[in-house]
């Protein structure tokens, strides 16, 4: 089973860079929910992986909101420690009590001696690395102080490293997804510039790519397109670049709305071409007075979303199985009669559930697959 089947909303590229660190331990408790460089620059330097994923840098982050804070400008030390193999596990644990911010054991460390092992660790700049290692070694009864090497770096390395894992992606011939900080591989192609941030849709995931290939095959000049669960806005932007005259993106997450608008601007697309609408909650709180601005704002949002019903030549919903089943009628309602509808965000094993639910709404149903993920498409019945 493909790893991507487990968590659709984990970035594959980010997991390859950071999650694969073996036996990672840290004395900092955190929940990392971002992959945007702007937000990663706010993570304290103690939230580090092994030194193999770090490099020295003398530059500071240019756009960080914490650029004037002590944490933002402080350095860290990436320390690689060689010690007896039978003591490595224990030493990596006790180092956390003597000043290390994180430690990780190398499974394949390339040690010349089978009796030795490497520990990768991170120390803040104000820690006395030699003293910390000496005290940790003494505490577990090591007769000799382990040898080690130290490299220094700045916290902003996380931004650089995160950016490095996102490469331009050629989804299909002539259609590229390009991180905003990367150069364009093919200036003659249809190029979509994206800042992979809080919202889903960086171009890495198979369902995003399936939807993009589907769009390229069905969008005609002058079409109107609606993206149900727009995330980063990547599909709506692609539809416009492939010839659509108007695109609408709907999402329940305010952060997705912000992300989609940012990415639209990166591609020179204004609000007159791409409307991004926040779908309000199912109910308005009863404690809010009917005359308040909050109620009026929600009514305005509902009205804007409802006004899109039955208007669009192409509709795509790339979300998750349960909402695809629950909101099937709602999703298809945005399409014109005989319009094309694409349904994705599902693994191949879930295709029968989707076909069973959507067969009353769509005709000419077909299925495309990539890496155990699927996209079901058809035409809205009159």
Image (spheres, rainbow, N blue to C red):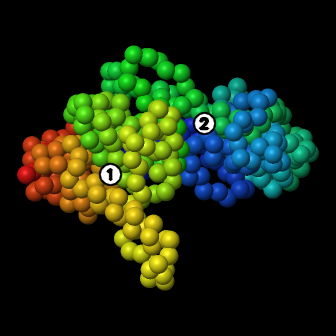
Q: Which residue is nearer to you in this view: 178 or 372?
A: 178
Q: Earlier in the sequence, mark 2 or mark 1?
A: 2
Q: Residues within 10 Å of mark 1 (few under 14, many from 20)?
A: many
**Dot 2 crowding, Cα within 10 Å, few <14, some 14–19, many 20+:** some
Can you say whether 63 is above or below 311 in the image? Answer: above
Residue at 39%, 37% (x, y): give it.
237
Q: Which residue is mark 2?
A: 162
In-image side of 156 versus 361 (left or right)? right
Q: Residue at x 60, y 56 (%)?
A: 31
* Residue 349 % position (x, y): 24, 50
Mark 2–mark 1 Cα distance, whole angstroms, equals 28 Å
Say which residue label 1 marks.
228
Q: Which of the pair 112/149 is nearer the observer?
A: 149
Whole-percent x, y for residue 326 in the image: 26, 64
Quarter holding the N terminus is top left
Image coordinates for residue 60, horizontal then vertical, percent: 76, 34
């Amino acid at each position: 089973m493909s790893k991507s089947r487990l968590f659709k909303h984990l970035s594959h590229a980010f997991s390859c860079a950071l999650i694969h660190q073996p036996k990672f331990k840290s004395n900092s408790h955190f929940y990392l929910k971002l992959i945007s460089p702007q937000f990663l620059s706010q993570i304290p330097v103690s939230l580090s992986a092994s030194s193999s994923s770090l490099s020295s840098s003398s530059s500071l982050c240019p756009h960080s909101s914490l650029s004037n804070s002590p944490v933002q400008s402080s350095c860290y030390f990436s320390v690689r420690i060689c010690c007896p193999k039978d003591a490595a596990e224990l030493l990596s644990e006790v180092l956390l009590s003597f000043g290390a911010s994180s430690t990780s054991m190398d499974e394949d460390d390339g040690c010349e001696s089978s009796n030795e092992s490497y520990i990768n660790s991170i120390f803040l700049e104000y820690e006395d690395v030699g003293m910390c290692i000496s005290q940790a070694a003494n505490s577990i009864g090591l007769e000799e102080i382990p040898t080690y090497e130290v490299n220094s770096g700045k916290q902003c390395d996380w931004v650089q490293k995160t950016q490095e894992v996102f490469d331009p992606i050629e989804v299909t011939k002539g259609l590229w997804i390009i991180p905003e900080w990367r150069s364009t591989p093919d200036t003659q192609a249809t190029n979509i510039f994206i800042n992979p941030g809080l919202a889903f849709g960086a171009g890495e995931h198979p369902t995003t790519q399936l939807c993009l290939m589907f769009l390229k095959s069905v969008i005609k000049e002058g079409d109107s397109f609606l993206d149900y669960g727009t995330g980063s806005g990547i599909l709506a932007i692609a539809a416009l670049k492939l010839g659509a005259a108007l695109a609408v993106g709907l999402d329940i997450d305010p952060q997705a709305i912000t992300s989609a608008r940012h990415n639209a601007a990166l591609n020179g697309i204004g609000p007159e071409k791409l409307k991004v609408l926040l779908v309000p909650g199912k109910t308005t709180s009863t404690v809010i007075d009917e005359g308040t601005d909050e109620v009026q704002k929600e009514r305005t949002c509902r009205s804007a979303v409802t006004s899109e019903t039955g208007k669009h030549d192409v509709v795509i919903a790339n979300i998750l199985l349960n909402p695809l089943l629950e909101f099937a009628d709602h999703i298809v309602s945005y399409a014109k009669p005989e319009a094309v509808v694409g349904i994705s965000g599902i693994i191949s094993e879930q295709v029968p559930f989707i076909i069973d639910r959507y067969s009353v709404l769509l005709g000419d149903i077909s299925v495309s697959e990539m890496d155990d993920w699927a996209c079901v498409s058809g035409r809205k019945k009159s």
